[in-house]
Each structure stands twice: as C-alpha cells, then as structure tokens.
Amino acid sequence: MLYTICIALILIASVLIILAVLVQNPKSGMAANFGVSNQVMGVRETSNFLEKFTWTMAVVIVVLSLVATLAMDKDLVSTSNSEIAKDVQALQERVIEAEAPATMPQAEIPAEQPAQTEAQPAATPSAE
C-alpha cells in the first residue's frame, strides 16, 4: 500500500517539476525572446520561487524513490530476482553457444602417393 502511494506521489511530483521547468524564464538562447511574461506582469520573485520549487520537487522525488524501494514487497522482489536469474542464465548459454568457433569444413589433403613404377600398367591405349 505504501509502495503504491509513493509511486503515485512520484508521478505527481514529476509532472509538477516538468511544469516548473517549462515555466521558468530562460536566461539566454532562442527561447529567451519568448520569456517576457515576468517583465510584463511585474512579478520579480517568480523565478526565485520556481527555482526553489524545482529543487524541492527534485528532493521529494529522490526521497520518495528511496521510501518506495524500502516499501517493496520482499516476496515479489525475490520471485522477480529468481526469474531474472533464470533469464540471465539462458542468455549466457546462448552467448556461449554463439561464441563457439564455427568449424569450417577442411579440405582433405591427399596422402603422398608413391611414384608410379613401371610395374603398374599405364593407361591402356584406346583401340583404334
């Protein structure tokens, strides 16, 4: 239950940090031309607040991630780890089989034949 709550809060904090980063006034670059909203509205502390909010959300995400890790169900984690270990073992076996050098067919080298002696009949002349 705590794990699910932590994941939901992490998702909400992630969306908030995305929005905070998108709203911040860019310092330079092409997007700086479009960031005149703070000057028009006359709000000077908005960028300071957004920066603090961004850092706060980043810390919240890190802390919630650690709490979610500690709140995981131990039985599910051990089951998942054993399944992962089986998959790793199967993958290692496939890699080892693939790394085995492929044996190329070797041409047979004929053994040295003794020189033909005159005792052996030469090719028979064809009858004409």
Image (cartoon, rainbow, N blue to C red):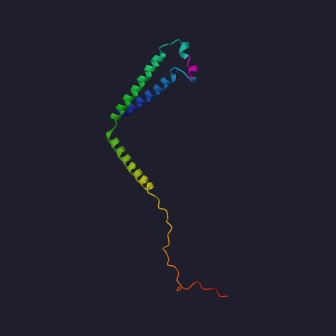
Q: Position of residue 52 (x, y in %)?
A: 43, 20
Q: Which quadrant of the figure has residue 125?
A: bottom right
Residue in the foreground of this view, choosing between 75 and 44: 44
Viewer-proximal residue, 45 or 112?
Answer: 112
Task: For the N terminus, give its image quadrant.
Answer: top left
Query: Can I make out residue 5 in this image?
Result: no
Along the horizontal axis of the image, is 45 left or right of 123? left
Residue 119: horizontal and vertical position, in percent? Answer: 52, 86
Residue found at x 43% / y 21%: 53
Highlighted magenta segment, given as a residue range: 31-36
For this orientation, the residue located farthest to the right is 128
Magenta stretch contains residue 74 = no
- Seen from this angle, which residue lies furthest left? 74
Eyeballing the image, is 6 above or below 74? above
From the viewer's perspective, is 31 left or right of 80?
Answer: right
Q: Residue at x 48, y 26 (%)?
A: 18
| Quarter-of-image position of residue 39 | top right
